[in-house]
Image (cartoon, helix red, strand yellow):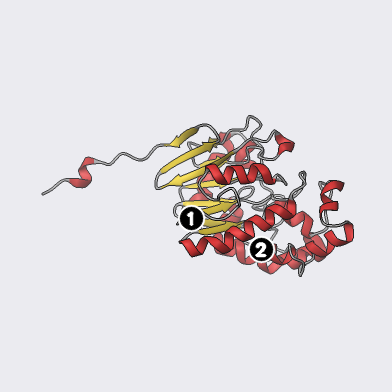
C-alpha cells in the first residue's frame, strides 16, 4: 500500500476491500504480510488516526499469523527532522497545537518513538519494498546494510541534517527520495534496476513516492518495478487501490475492479516428466 498522506477514510476503505481490516480497523488479514511504503503524514489531516491504526494492526496481525511492515518515507523523515513545509495548520490543531505536535514527533514522543526504529526497506519473498527506489549504489550493500545505516544515522540526521548522514541514505539518491525508476527513460534506468535487483537477489521492486496521476498502479521495465503511489489522499484525488502479490501473480486491487499485472507462471510440462 502506497502513500496515504493523512487520509484515514480512504486508508480504511482500502484495507477493508483488500481483506486486511474490518470497518473498526481490526486485523482480519489472517497470515497476510501487509507492507506500507511510508508517507503516512503531511498534506492531509488524519496523521494521528492513521498511525494509531497502523500500530493497532501491527500489534494484532501476529496473533492471527500475519505481519505488518511499515516503512519510512521521506515525509516521515522530514517531520522527524522538523521540516514541516507540507503540514497543514488544521492538521497541527489535531495535536493540540504546534508545541504538542513537536512533542509527538520528538524521538521519545508517541509518533517519533514509533518511527525511529522502522526500516527503510524490506524483502518479502522475491520482492523488495521501499518508498522511493533503491539505486545500485545502495543496493550493492544489501537490504540489511541499508536498514542498519538508517538506524545508525537517523538521530544524527535529525540533529545535524546531511552532516549526520555519512552514507547518504537520507539524501536525494537514497531509498526514500530516489525517483529514477519512476520517471527516467526506461532505456536509462532499466539496466540500473536490473543491477540493483541482482545485488539484492530479488525479482522486482515495489515503490511509492511518485504519484500516478490517473489513480492506477503502473509497472515499468517489464514489470520489474511497480509504482503504487496512486494518490490515495483526497489531496491527490482520493484514488483507492492496493497491490496484492500471491506467489507469482501480481494484482492491482481497486474498489470496484482488479487488474492482473503479472499472471501466474504456467507450469512447464517438463517439470513433471517421469523417466
Q: Nearer the viewer, mark 2 or mark 1?
A: 1
Q: Secondary structure at mark 1?
A: strand
- The residue that mark 1 highlights is 124
Q: Quadrant of residue 249?
A: top left
Instruction: Tell me which residue sits at (55%, 58%) in the image.
Output: 68
**Are circles 2 and 1 on residues that touch, CB within 8 Å?**
no
Q: Let me know if residue 171 appears in the view.
A: no
- Cα separation, mark 2 vs mark 1, equals 19 Å
Instruction: State which tag comes first along the sequence, 2 or 1.
Output: 1
In the image, 92 versus 76, the foreground residue is 92
- Please provide percent x and percent y for residue 45: 77, 47
Residue lying farthest to the top in this orientation: 214
Horizontally, residue 51 falls left or right of residue 34, namely right
In the image, 224 versus 111, the foreground residue is 111
Crowdedness of circle 2 by 10 Å Cα count: few (<14), some, many (20+)?
many
Instruction: Tell me which residue sits at (47%, 54%) in the image.
Output: 32
Residue lying farthest to the front in this orientation: 24
Q: What mark, if any, has residue 45 been given in the picture?
A: none
Q: Secondary structure at mark 2?
A: helix
- Please provide percent x and percent y for residue 224: 49, 42
Crowdedness of circle 1 by 10 Å Cα count: few (<14), some, many (20+)?
few
Instruction: Tell me which residue sits at (60%, 42%) in the image.
Output: 13
Q: What mark, if any, has residue 150 been given in the picture?
A: 2
Tell how many labels.
2
In the image, 190 versus 232, the foreground residue is 232
Q: Let me know if residue 128 appears in the view.
A: yes
- Please provide percent x and percent y for residue 35: 56, 53
- Please provide percent x and percent y for residue 176: 67, 51
Amino acid at each position: 500500500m502506497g502513500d496515504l498522506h493523512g487520509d484515514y477514510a480512504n486508508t480504511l476503505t482500502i484495507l477493508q476491500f483488500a481483506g486486511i481490516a474490518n470497518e473498526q480497523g481490526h486485523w482480519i488479514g489472517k497470515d497476510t504480510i501487509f507492507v506500507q511504503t511510508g508517507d503516512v503524514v503531511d498534506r492531509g489531516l488524519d496523521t494521528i488516526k492513521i498511525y494509531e491504526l497502523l500500530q493497532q494492526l501491527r500489534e494484532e496481525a501476529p496473533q492471527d499469523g500475519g505481519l505488518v511492515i511499515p516503512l519510512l518515507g521521506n515525509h516521515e523523515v522530514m517531520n522527524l527532522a522538523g521540516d514541516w513545509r507540507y503540514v497543514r495548520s488544521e492538521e497541527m490543531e489535531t495535536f493540540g497545537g504546534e508545541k504538542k505536535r513537536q512533542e509527538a514527533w520528538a524521538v521519545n514522543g508517541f509518533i517519533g518513538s514509533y518511527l525511529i526504529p522502522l526500516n527503510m526497506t524490506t524483502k518479502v519473498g522475491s520482492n523488495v519494498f521501499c518508498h522511493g527506489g533503491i539505486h545500485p549504489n545502495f543496493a550493492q550493500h544489501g537490504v540489511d546494510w541499508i536498514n542498519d545505516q538508517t538506524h545508525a544515522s537517523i538521530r544524527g540526521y535529525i540533529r545535524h541534517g546531511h552532516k549526520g548522514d555519512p552514507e547518504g541514505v537520507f539524501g536525494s539518491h537514497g531509498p526514500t527520495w530516489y525517483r529514477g525508476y519512476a520517471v527516467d527513460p526506461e532505456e536509462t534506468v532499466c539496466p540500473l534496476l536490473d543491477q540493483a535487483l541482482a545485488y539484492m537477489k530479488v525479482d522486482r521492486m515495489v515503490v511509492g513516492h511518485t504519484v500516478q496521476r490517473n489513480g492506477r498502479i503502473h509497472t515499468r521495465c517489464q514489470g520489474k518495478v511497480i509504482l503504487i503511489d496512486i494518490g490515495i489522499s483526497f489531496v491527490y484525488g482520493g484514488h483507492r487501490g492496493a497491490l496484492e502479490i500471491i506467489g507469482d501473480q501480481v494484482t492491482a486491487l481497486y474498489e470496484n475492479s482488479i487488474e492482473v499485472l503479472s499472471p501466474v507462471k504456467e507450469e512447464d510440462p517438463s517439470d513433471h516428466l517421469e523417466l
